[in-house]
């Protein structure tokens, strides 16, 4: 029978290939959004003022470029929010010494590192979802109800990508 630690280790073992897959999907979405925005700009230029505003194609272009440069976007937002680069999942014990630093070794430590790696990967997916929702806002498909969730997904995704730093900040905030 497979225990929980083995399941987490198996999932963590698949994360590098899944991360590569999602970066390729991000690049494809970026190219698609850039092409769609250039088509929209061309249509707006040909038809004149009756074709709508410049805002939707320009915003779609910016979001497409953000998808193309997703690792750079996440790194920039990380440095903006946390003033340092993205940490390794194993560093969670350094950032939260009071709550997690007590685990000296064994399966508990490996399990927490695996869960943190999974949370960090889910953060990348959340940033991609947020960018997609922001693009829907630019297109007018979801109205104002997609801007708030899109921005929330981007911010929460960056915090999940930097989960060790976020846990350390929360520990310092709570414990003083």
Image (cartoon, grey):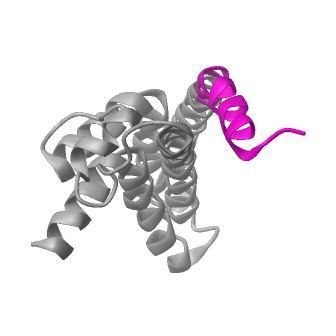
Extreme residue in the left direction:
176
Left or right of 49, for residue 174: left
Q: Main secondary structure of the magenta part?
A: helix
* Residue 24 to residue 173: above or below: above
Q: Quadrant of the C terminus?
A: bottom left
* Residue at the (62%, 72%) spot, across then down: 142
> Which stretch is magenta?
1-22
Instruction: Residue 101: give x, y in percent of width and height.
Output: 29, 49
Q: Is residue 4 visible?
A: yes
Residue 50 on the magenta segment: no
* Residue 139 to residue 158: above or below: below
Left or right of 92, for residue 43: right
* Residue at the (48%, 49%) spot, across then down: 127
Front-lying residue, 79 or 55: 79
* Residue at the (57%, 45%) spot, across then down: 125
* Residue 132 to residue 170: above or below: above
Front-lying residue, 91 or 29: 91
* Residue at the (24%, 38%) spot, across then down: 76
Q: Is residue 18 visible?
A: no
Residue 18 on the magenta segment: yes
Extreme residue in the right direction:
1
């Amino acid at each position: 029978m497979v225990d929980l630690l083995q399941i987490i280790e198996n999932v963590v073992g698949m994360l590098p290939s899944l991360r590569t897959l999602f970066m390729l999907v991000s690049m494809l979405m970026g190219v698609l959004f850039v092409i769609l925005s250039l088509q929209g700009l061309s249509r707006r230029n040909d038809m004149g003022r009756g074709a709508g505003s410049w805002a939707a194609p320009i915003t779609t272009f910016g979001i497409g470029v953000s998808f193309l440069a997703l690792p750079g976007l996440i790194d920039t937002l990380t440095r903006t929010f946390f003033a340092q680069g993205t940490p390794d999942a194993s560093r969670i014990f350094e950032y939260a010494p009071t709550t997690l630093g007590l685990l000296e070794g064994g399966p508990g430590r490996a399990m927490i590192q695996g869960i943190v790696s999974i949370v960090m990967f889910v953060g990348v997916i959340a940033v991609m979802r947020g960018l997609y929702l922001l693009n829907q806002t630019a297109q007018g498909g979801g109205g104002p109800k997609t801007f708030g969730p899109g921005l929330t997904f981007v911010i929460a995704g960056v915090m999940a990508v930097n989960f060790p730093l976020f846990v350390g900040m929360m520990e310092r905030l709570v414990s003083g």
